[in-house]
Structures are given as C-alpha cells and as structure tokens.
Image: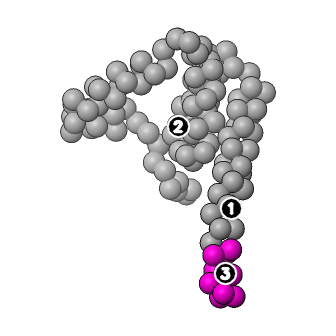
Amino acid sequence: MSESLYPQSTAKHGQERQRLTPDAAEAFKAFSRAVFAEGALSEKTKQLIAVAVAHVTQCPYCIKGHADGALKKGATAEEIMEAIWVAAEMRAGAAYAHSAITLETLSKHQETNNG
C-alpha cells in the first residue's frame, strides 16, 4: 500500500472548512473568483501564472488544480511547461541574486579578521 504525504483533497474537506469558518471560506472563494476572472489578463494567462507560482511554492494541490485550470482555459502542454521553466529560472535567479548577502557577510568578516 502506498501512502502519500498529502491526502487527496475531497469535497468532505471543503465542507469541513465551510462548517468551521463559513465567513472566511466564503470570502476566500469570492476572492479567488475575482482574481481568476477575465480582466486585463486573460483567464488562461492567470492560470499559467498560477501554475508557475504553484511550482515555486511547491503546493501539490495548487499544481494539480491550476494545471487543470490552465488546460481548461486552452493552455497547451508546451505553454504550461514554459511557465514552469520561468518559475524554475526565477527560483534559481533569486538564489543567485541573494548571494550578494553572503558576499557582503564574507567581506565584512574578512575586514574584521584582517583589520
């Protein structure tokens, strides 16, 4: 038997969230509908952005849900994969850019020890 770290999301989970915090659950649903509605960005573009962000935040529920959403809005497999590559570059780029913090720390340490 294979056990997953993440349980399968079910309607029962949604009902329980709704029961425990109905106002917050409704507000979140309304917020989500507003965010993903057609606007200056197409619904497809918003779903592709969500796919990329989901990979950076590493949320398996979001990855599945927004990959599904992107497909339903007409995204191709190639577009979805390109969005994921953009996310990967941004994640790697952030590590590279933040190396400036380490370089400054190393420089200050060297000045302190050699000064």
Note whether 21 is above or below 91 in the view shown. above
Residue position marked by numbered label 2 in the rendering: 62
Report x, y in % for residue 64. Answer: 57, 35
Q: Quadrant of residue 51?
A: top right
Q: Residue at coordinates 49% horizontally, 20% vertically from top-left?
A: 36
- Magenta stretch: helix, strand or loop mostly: helix
Contact (Cβ within 8 Å) of mark 1 with mark 3? no
Which numbered tag is attached to residue 99? 1
- The magenta-colored residue range is 106-115
Q: Quadrant of residue 88?
A: top right
Note whether 28 is above or below 94 in the view shown. above
Q: Nearer the viewer, residue 9 or 51?
A: 51
Please give left or right for residue 108 compared with residue 36 in the image: right
N-term mark: 2 or 3: 2
Label 2: element kind: helix
Please give left or right for residue 28 compared with residue 74 in the image: left
N-term mark: 2 or 1: 2
Q: Is residue 12 visible?
A: no
